[in-house]
Amino acid sequence: MDGTEGSAGQPGPAERSHRSSVSSVGARVADVLVYLADDTVVPLAVENLPSLSAHELHRAIREVLQLPDMALEVFALWLVSPLLDEPFLQFRRNVFFPKQRELQIHDEEVLRLLYEEAKGNVLAARYPCDVEDCEALGALVCRVQLGPYQPGQPAACALREKLDSFLPAHLCKRGQGLFAALRGRGARAGPGEQGLLNAYRQVQEASSDDGCEATLGTHYRAYLLKCHELPFYGCAFFHGEVDKPAPGFLHRGGRKPVSVAISLEGVHVIDSREKHVLLGLRFQELSWDHTSPEEEEPVLWLEFDGESEGTPVNKLLKIYSKQAELMSSLIEYCIELSQAAESAGPQDSATGPPLDPGSSPAPVQRPKLRRQGSVVCSRIQHLSTIDYVEDGKGIRRVKPKRTTSFFSRQLSLGQGSYTVVQTGDSLEQG
């Protein structure tokens, strides 16, 4: 259910394609290899592998890693196949685990595993981040890997040598982005490196305000809390393609590769090359379906409200993907969980009770204002959509528009903002 690109510092698709989660099979015992988010391997000697349940394998991993019982809810076993060949097992965050409950975790090893997974996603640009956020997250990684910031020490040299351990690779390349000066001549820090140094110093100042040095668990939690501001944190990722807008009258637009991120809260379509969000929708804002014609590619269809030249329309986006049916099923299941939590009430909702006895409720966070031009903001103008309206008698195309939902599959909650678009006689017949 995951993507094909290797995270920074991890093997790429070609190397991972040779992995196997079963290294040797005997008459009774098999050596099962389970990969963690930081790409370390947990070997397990398992008897009667064909009859072993996922729950028993999960318990065996928890025992080897000495994790508390809460890890049963926090983590899940993932079958990952980067090149759609032999899959291997990964022990990763459970996509159905609410991030509100994540703030109630106090076990340092659980926090470390979550931190390592989130860090890998940031460095691989699977979680697109603005430069300011990259610096803030990179500074926390500096604190974890390099220790406390010490004025007067050659911290800039250490950062320059390991820059791709702290920042996404596309920000570290020569001649690209804010960090183009980092590989140039001279000992003076470039502007991006200086920003990372400043953020590193601020982490140290903040952690020492109370007179005692913060624990690693505190820095893991701070990293996760920062990642919670990203709308696609904790998502399951899928690969697909969307149509590009046609550049001219006689030219076809072609397609662009995208990642489709699905969580308990909604769907995000991310440009895999440009590292920014193309479309972000809550479940209340969309309807969806999938098709698998025999002679055509499977398609996930997303429908959402928009406008065309000032006219309210319904927009229909086609996402071509072999995983279209899997994405559709996950959306449906996430919506079912959302509806169950809504009907259960606040005390029995998906946030659940505290995981540890005596833990305090998660702090209420005010939403941050999104920066103008932020990579997490939708860029619908970069998408080619089919736009329609409804005139009460039938569906009419509105150069290039969409309409009332083709699909009955949508989340129907009272607070939802998805509406059926209807028009008067002023719209032209397509």
Image (spheres, grey):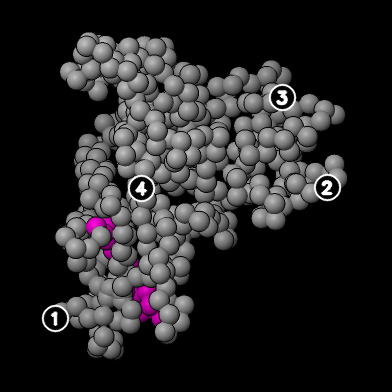
Q: Secondary structure at mark 1?
A: loop
Q: Mark 1: few, some, or many residues within 10 Å (few <14, many ≥20)?
A: few
Q: Which residues are magenta?
A: 298-313
Would you place residue 118 above or below residue 111 in this image?
below
Tag count in the figure?
4
Which mark, residue 16?
A: none
Of labels 3 and 4, earlier in sequence is: 3
Task: Measure the C-alpha gap from mark 1 to mark 3.
Answer: 68 Å
The image quadrant that residue 402 belongs to is bottom left
Horizontal side, residue 94 vs residue 222: left or right? left
Task: Measure the C-alpha gap from mark 2 to mark 4.
Answer: 41 Å
Which marked residue is nearer to the observer: mark 2 or mark 3? Answer: 2
User: Where in the figure is residue 268, as x and y percent of width and height?
Assistant: 39, 53
Of labels 2 and 3, earlier in sequence is: 3
Horizontal side, residue 56 vs residue 64: left or right? left
Horizontal side, residue 242 vs residue 214: left or right? left
Q: Mark 2: few, some, or many residues within 10 Å (few <14, many ≥20)?
A: few
Q: Secondary structure at mark 4?
A: strand
Q: Quadrant of the C terminus?
A: bottom left
For the residues bearing labels 1 and 4, Cβ distance under 8 angstroms: no
User: Where in the figure is residue 178, as x and y percent of width and height?
Assistant: 69, 53
Which mark, residue 148?
A: 3
Task: Measure the C-alpha gap from mark 1 to mark 4.
Answer: 38 Å
Of labels 1 and 4, earlier in sequence is: 4
Q: Mark 2 sits on what residue?
A: 185
